[in-house]
Amino acid sequence: MNKKLLALAVGAAFGAAPMFASAEVSVYGHAQVEVGTVDNGTTDTTEVQDNARGRLGVKASEKLGNGMTAIAKFEWKIDTTLGGAATGQRESFVGLKGGFGTVQLGALKSGYKYTGGVKYDPFVATMIEARGANGMSKGELGNGAFGHNSFLANSIGYMTPKMGNGFSAWATFSPDESGVANGADGDYSFGLQFTQKAWEVFVAGVNNDDAAGGDAIKVGGQYKFGNFKVSGQYEMLSFNTTGTPDMDIYFLGGQAKFGNNVLVAQFGNKDPGGTASDLNYYTIGVIHNLSKKTRLTAGFRSYETGATANVDNDTFAVGMRMKF
């Protein structure tokens, strides 16, 4: 009820209150703050960060009959440490959902990012995450939207309905010819997944058609047994720029749940190709769930940078997150 009242207030502020009379609307968000020490091999600093976790969103749906539902969403990036200042738009779309699956149009989640990917890293959007630190791709293909960051703009997306055989598919394509950085003519992503009770396997791909872009394909899976979970994926990146060598990125993660606590250990390796040295990543940490929506985290991350003489970048961080 409180979320509906808040949604009505937001709608009134935007002059859209009449729409809410026929549509189900909810407001949601995430707030997070971390405090950490960061040693990049040259300087040692203490930082207070949100780490791109803060967000505020509005979701709407309307039943149309014949099993169809109209859906819409706007989500904004909010920096909790800056007093809630909006720092950019995230996912936004309008679409239809029914027995045929789901069709979305707008700035969309990537099947590459969310098949395995960020769903396998419980520390995603924290100071000790894997992406951008040799554990998962980020901006290697010219824009983070073609790795495990950001969203594909100007796109059309389709997700299959739930199938009893455990198979699901997800595809996103941009026909736009304006040449924007993260969603232009020829850009696409896809994810194919087969899920059973204790395990899942997948293959996913993404393409940035820009001259400075490229494409990637990855395979991976997850296995659960008792209170334990093991996840892994292997990414293969190739580039449109002549002479740029292919790149490989590996990720392996393990989680053990004990009561309200989850112990996490993760390892990654990036092979930049050519004569450049491999770069490693590892994280160890703990998540303490105060409730289903509020958690505390603490952990240590180390990853390497450099083409020949690798330099360790070490971070220890503690934080708190609340969803609402």
Image (cartoon, grey):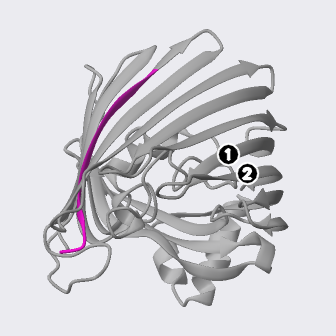
Quarter holding the C terminus? bottom right
Mark 2 and mark 1 lie on one chain; the one further toward the N terminus is 1
Q: How many marks?
A: 2
Q: Residue sitting at 55 percent across and 52 percent down?
A: 133
Q: Nearer the viewer, residue 83 or 222?
A: 222
Say which residue label 1 marks. 302
Quadrant in which residue 220 is drawn: top left
Q: As drawn, is 71 to the left or to the right of 158?
A: right
Q: Is residue 212 magenta?
A: yes
Q: Residue sitting at 74 percent across and 66 percent down?
A: 42
Residue 178 drawn above or below residue 306: below
| Three-letter amino acid code at the position of disc 2 | Asp
Is there CB contact under 8 Å for labels 2 and 1? Answer: yes
Q: For the residue carrying disc 1, how many other residues have a C-alpha within 10 Å: few (<14), some (14-19), or many (20+)?
A: many
Q: Main secondary structure of the magenta part?
A: strand
- Residue 174 rendering spot, x and y as whole percentages: 19, 69
Q: What's the CA distance linking mark 2 and mark 1? A: 4 Å
Quarter holding the N terminus? bottom right
Q: Which numbered tag is attached to residue 192?
A: none
Q: Is residue 266 magenta?
A: no
Q: Nearer the viewer, residue 151 or 67?
A: 151
- Residue 192 rendering spot, x and y as whole percentages: 25, 36
Residue 253 visible, this angle:
yes
Residue 191 drawn above or below residue 263: below
Residue range corresponding to the magenta coloring: 211-222
Say which residue label 2 marks. 314
Q: Nearer the viewer, residue 212 or 53?
A: 212
| Three-letter amino acid code at the position of disc 1 | Ser
Quadrant in which residue 218 is drawn: top left
Q: As drawn, is 79 to the left or to the right of 245?
A: right
Q: Secondary structure at mark 2?
A: strand
